[in-house]
Image (spheres, rainbow, N blue to C red):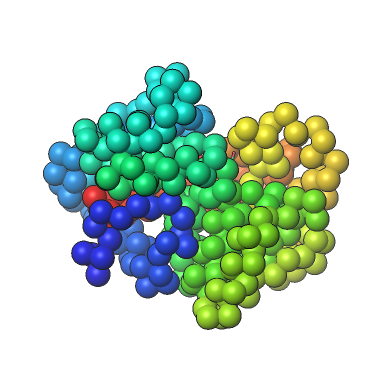
Amino acid sequence: MTQAFRGRHFLDLADFSREEILYFLEVALDLKKRWVLGERLGILGGKIVALLFEKPSLRTRVSFEVAVRQLGGECFYLGPQEVGLGKREAVKDVALVLGRMVDGIVIRTFAHETVLEMARYAGVPVINGLSDLHHPCQVLGDLLTVQEKKGTLNVKIVFVGDGNNVCHSWIVAAARLGLSLTVCTPERYRPSWEIWNWAQREAQKSRAEIVYEVDPRKAVLGADVVYTDVWASMGKEQELEERLSFFWPYQVNNELLALASPEVIVMHCMPAHRGQEITDEVIDGAHSVVIDEAENRLHAQKAILSLLL
Ligand code: CP
Ligand code: NVA
């Protein structure tokens, strides 16, 4: 199995089969256990990874930096001012040059097309650390969290909020793995139809149940996992005022959570806007697993790096 991953990109979970996604999780869990036991692994053997970020980040940047170092590699960070991706220099040229010098590239950018172009020309594995369309590393870590907390992925998962990049990666994951996912957004902020229609076709093969429900109170009924994310993603902050009027009924608060399973876990990719999509009492409450979820980014990223590089 391991050989099948070498040299590939990690751009979208749709690029991987059910078995391959499950293998990432298996490796992540194994690496997590070994780290806890104090084993130090030199899997990356001095390989060098560039982190090319056009948007701010805490979890993705730090988890990749720590993961690379803990696996015996080296990395460096390039922020928006340093590279001027597509402005100072064409994306293609940045990709061609970086690819001659590093062993892997993690990119966080706006247009998903930039991620694809980087992958087309880099000649080394490119990892999508978030684009406007997808956040696959996040959802890989999230799957690990659901598996650990629930002992299975076959539970009722409800995504409440904006049909954004994280929501898209959840839809793709559900379609590939055959999961039960309810997507609950205001009508106007539904996820991409292209991704939705693709997922419905895939769901026929994987037996996934991916449904849309506009009413959050109906959506969360009996939910085992309630997931939310910000109402205005990075780059869309200026839309927040306008969005608020649509999103208030979608706030994950104690009243909404009371309709879910008594053992529900609450997830959020973070950063969270406390008092907007999630209240303090929920994110700090007994059902919240957001900090374990954030930690699992590190373990999931290690699986990606060790398999691709
Ligand atoms: N969840 C996540 O990707 O967080 P950062 O934006 O801080 O990397
Ligand atoms: N949807 C959010 C996720 C941040 C990790 C954003 O794109 O800003």
- Residue 181 position, x and y percent, is 63, 68
Quadrant of the image for the N terminus? Answer: bottom left
Q: In the image, what residue occupies the spot 57% across and 38% down?
A: 271
User: Which quadrant holds residue 275?
Assistant: top right
- Residue 54 position, x and y percent, is 48, 30
Q: In the image, what residue occupies the spot 61% across and 54% down?
A: 167
Residue found at the very far right of the displayed protein:
245
- Residue 208 position, x and y percent, is 58, 76
Ligand 2 in which quarter? top right
- Residue 29 position, x and y percent, is 33, 60
Please tell me which residue lies in front, 92 or 84: 92
Residue 85 visible, this orientation: yes
User: Which quadrant holds residue 185?
Assistant: bottom right
Horizontal side of residue 260 vs 267, given as left or right: right
Horizontal side of residue 78 vs 1, given as left or right: right
Position of 286 relative to 205 (above/below): above
Q: In the image, what residue occupies the spot 66% across and 42% down?
A: 230
